[in-house]
Image (spheres, rainbow, N blue to C red):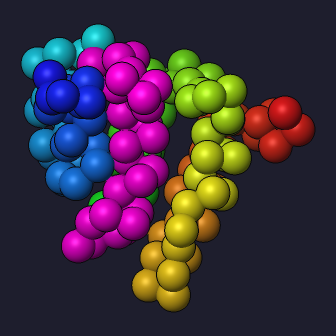
Amino acid sequence: TSVNGMLPFHCACLKNTVATVEYLYKLYPDAINQTTSRGFYPIHSAMMGVENRDDPLAAVGTVKYLFDFDPNVKFQKVNEISLIEFACQGGFNDKTIEVALEVIQVIYNAHPEAIEE
């Protein structure tokens, strides 16, 4: 665990490939439900990865993977902010906006009711 409470799984979700995320998940599946000291779950790290990766599209695969392996991820909030609202607050640019919209679509598909929360 790092100073801010990030597990290796959080870091993998933020910057690595789906294969790395899958490998670490198999080693420590409970990590999917662990928060950092600021309340971020790994799904939040994956969504922030849109802005922090050399290949932003890899974030979409990571978000899909997390939903596939634990459907309850859709209920994870930080500071009472739903995943779809969190995704919409990103600082996207011309390079990342299309990927951000794909992530939002994945979140919506997993939990359409969130749009009304």
Q: Residue furthest top?
A: 30
Would you place residue 98 above or below residue 51 in this image?
below
Would you place residue 24 above or below residue 48 in this image?
above
Please report the residue visible at 29 percent of the width from the left and 12 percent of the height from the top: 30
Q: Is residue 72 left or right of residue 17?
A: right
Q: Which image quadrant: the C terminus? A: top right
Please report the residue visible at 23 percent of the width from the left and 48 percent of the height from the top: 18
- The total of numbered circles placed on residues is 0
Q: Residue furthest right?
A: 116
Residue 42 lies in the magenta-colored region: yes
Please report the residue visible at 68 percent of the width from the left and 27 percent of the height from the top: 80
Q: Quadrant of residue 64?
A: top left
Would you place residue 34 above or below residue 10 in this image?
above
Please report the residue visible at 56 percent of the width from the left and 30 percent of the height from the top: 78
- Counting from the top left corner in percent of width and height, residue 58 is at 31, 61
- Counting from the top left corner in percent of width and height, residue 23 is at 12, 32
- Counting from the top left corner in percent of width and height, residue 51 is at 39, 66
Q: Quadrant of residue 49?
A: bottom left
Q: Residue furthest bottom?
A: 94
Q: Is residue 8 left or right of residue 60?
A: left
Given residues 33 and 79, the one toward you in this image is 79
Residue 104 lies in the magenta-colored region: no
Residue 21 makes an appearance in the image: yes
- Counting from the top left corner in percent of width and height, residue 41 is at 42, 29
Would you place residue 48 above or below residue 28 in this image?
below
Bounds of the magenta span?
Answer: 31-57
